[in-house]
Image (cartoon, rainbow, N blue to C red):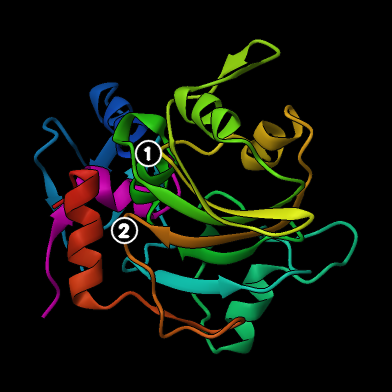
Amino acid sequence: MSSKVRINRYLAQAGFGSRRKCEELIRRGAVSINGNQVETLSATVDPDRDVVSVHGEPVAGFEKPVILVLNKPAGVISAVTDSFNRKTVIEIAREKGYRERIFPVGRLDFDTTGILLLTNDGEMANRLTHPRYKIDKTYLVTVEGDVPERTAVCIAGGIRWGDFTTQPCRVEIVKRAKNSTDLVVTLKEGKKRQVKKMFNLFGHRVVRLHRNAIGGMTFGDLAEGDMRPLRPGEERKLRTLLGLS
């Protein structure tokens, strides 16, 4: 027996953008169910029986929510496709037998390893990447040189480059070697190459970057290159953090 879902979630899952964007479509009168214009945001739809249309065109491609977690290896692109024919995280998913229409949530650089989520839930992806929801992302970082405590404090307090200022974060020095420093950095945002840029500003090149956790979840059972669906308890925790039912 099929369960009903809210119309805004159905549209987001079918690729019409975030739930907020889908709600705008409904308010403008662009959405109908079985030929009847949807007049309330609380309307529900049975994906197996109802015909939903947007601007008179039937909606196709609704899929049940899928959330996968990957321990990304180096040398893989966090993208659906790559114009340089480099291996992508979607190719890893296909190799593991996942055929759903999914996309990576945010990105990890080509040479960065660690935890990456892939999903077909547009609203979840939006909230995971939006600074408003302040979802912790923890990184294990190795940089060149001896990082002074004052530099760690400065980075943790927020720094400015160009016209952008980073939000406060947590920076912990774990180990100092002769020519390098190991740190743990926890961000609540994720600008492009943010960790590398923060340390580069102080003359410390990042030589290793590994995302260890998202939302406090570490997924220690995943070897490099492994992928699996989120377990029910993990998904509940993530949805609670994001304010999703």
Residue 206 position in % (x across, y down): 74, 49
Left or right for 218, reference 222: left
Q: Amino acid at mark 2?
A: Gly
The residue lying toward the viewer, choosing from 143 and 89, is: 143
Q: Which mark is residue 216?
A: 2
Q: Amino acid at mark 1?
A: Ser
Q: Secondary structure at mark 1?
A: loop
Position of the N terminus, as image quadrant, is: bottom left
Residue 33 in view, yes or no: no
The residue lying toward the viewer, choosing from 10 and 223, is: 223
Residue 14 position in % (x across, y down): 40, 54
Q: Which residues are magenta?
A: 1-18
Q: Dot 1, crowdedness within 10 Å: few (<14), some or many (≥20)?
A: many
Q: Dot 2, crowdedness within 10 Å: few (<14), some or many (≥20)?
A: some
Q: Which mark is residue 206?
A: none
**Which residue is most to the right?**
84
Q: Quadrant of residue 94?
A: bottom right
Q: Residue 105, relative to residue 224: is it above or below?
A: above
Q: Residue 171, relative to residue 151: is it above or below?
A: below
The residue lying toward the viewer, choosing from 197 and 68, is: 197
- Is 111 within the magenta? no
Earlier-in-chain disc, 1 versus 2: 1
Residue 11 position in % (x across, y down): 33, 47
Left or right for 65, reference 93: left
Q: Residue at x 43, y 34 (%)?
A: 169
Q: Quadrant of residue 161?
A: top right
Q: Residue at x 66, y 40 (%)?
A: 147
* Separation of marks 1 and 2 at Cα, in angstroms: 25 Å
Q: Which mark is residue 18?
A: 1
**Which residue is most to the front?**
178
